[in-house]
Image (cartoon, rainbow, N blue to C red):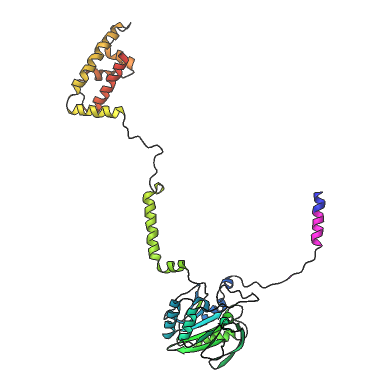
Amino acid sequence: MRWIVMLFAILTLTGCEYREVKRETGFKGRARVNPWLAAERFCEAYPGQVRSLAGWTEPTMADAVWFVPGSLLGNGSFTRRLSAWVTDGGHLVVMLDHAETAHDDWKPFAASFPPDPALKEMLEDFGLRLVSAEDGEKAHRAETLEFGGKNFLVEMKSDNGVTNGDGAPVSFVSMERDAGRLSVVADGRIFRNRWIGKKQHAEFLDALIRASGREGNIGFTRGDGLSLWSLASEHLWPVLLGLGLFVILWLWKNLSRFGPMEAAQVPSMLRGYEHHLGALGDFQWRLDKAAGMLAPLRQQILERGQRACQQRINHGDADLFTYLAEISDLPRERVQQALAETSPRDAAILTRTAADLQRLQQILY
């Protein structure tokens, strides 16, 4: 029955109709996580290095052109440092819409983000006015951009625009400021991986880079934002290193697993009778009172031992030391030494002699 059911299922599946549909889901590999990968490789032909930045990083005097998403400039500290860098000769390219990493180039609809007040204030300081959907601006397209005396065919669409006065907002403005330059592009998609190869987007990127007043590094910021961990790893690594070393030393000092293994059973601090007996014998030996302390005990053992030896059959003529050694399981030499030695040579012999005499006394009594 099972085989019949399986055969029926196979015949049913093979008889189904299906249709193949191909759908673009995006790039693979590095191009999927870095939307500026193609532009970065395009810029490798210029002097200087190409810097790929995940989040906010302040440009230096060695940097010539800096591409920054407008959504990243939401902090007055960022905008002030960028303005100072532009004044010193840098070329800042601000991309208002569709420039952050979270933007998906394969979505049919891409919303524009409202600009931050800090970005508006920075542009106003340069004499520009930002117009967004909040101001009643409708989405407009740009098919041609004029820059450096040339016209470039582009494909741009954005809800945000910029104007240098009371005129109509446009999709692109570039102006000089002291030794540097500020360029504002309404739609950043023209420089992303999917769109840079269309129309004259690459030629327009080349014109922006060549418009810089100096040679140097070219930086692309992906707009992932500023994280506490990136700040700590960049500026607080000495403190974190010292803190980690302190924790390791503290663990090594306080945890038993980092030191010698402890015994399963800790020896008792209470000392046995033998220890006290040894200490007492050492004290008496040092006072030279060993013979006087042992004399009464020896006298009792000799008296009882002789009577016991005479009463035993076949032991009437036996040696007393031999008899006592047999009944106490002690060597004859030790019995003779315990009963006949007048003064022990050291405290250890005194302790052993006292122990042997106590054994003999227990057996005889």
Residue 13 among magenta residues: yes
**Residue 330 vs residue 114: left or right?**
left
Image point 30% across, 27% down: which residue?
273
> On screen, 296 above or below 178?
above
Q: How many marks?
A: 0
Q: Quadrant of residue 172?
A: bottom right
Quadrant of the rendered image containing residue 277: top left
Q: With respect to residue 207, does 262 lie above or below?
A: above
Give the residue displayed 40% in from the left and 62% down from the top.
240
The x and y percentages for residue 12 are 81, 59
From where the camera sits, is residue 155 visible? Answer: no
Q: Is residue 338 above or below residue 153?
A: above
Q: Which residues are magenta?
A: 6-20
Q: Is residue 297 above or below residue 30?
A: above
Which secondary structure type mostly characterizes the magenta part of the structure?
Answer: helix
User: Is 38 in front, or is 1?
Assistant: 1
Q: Quadrant of the C terminus?
A: top left
Which percent across, then down, holds residue 113? 56, 77
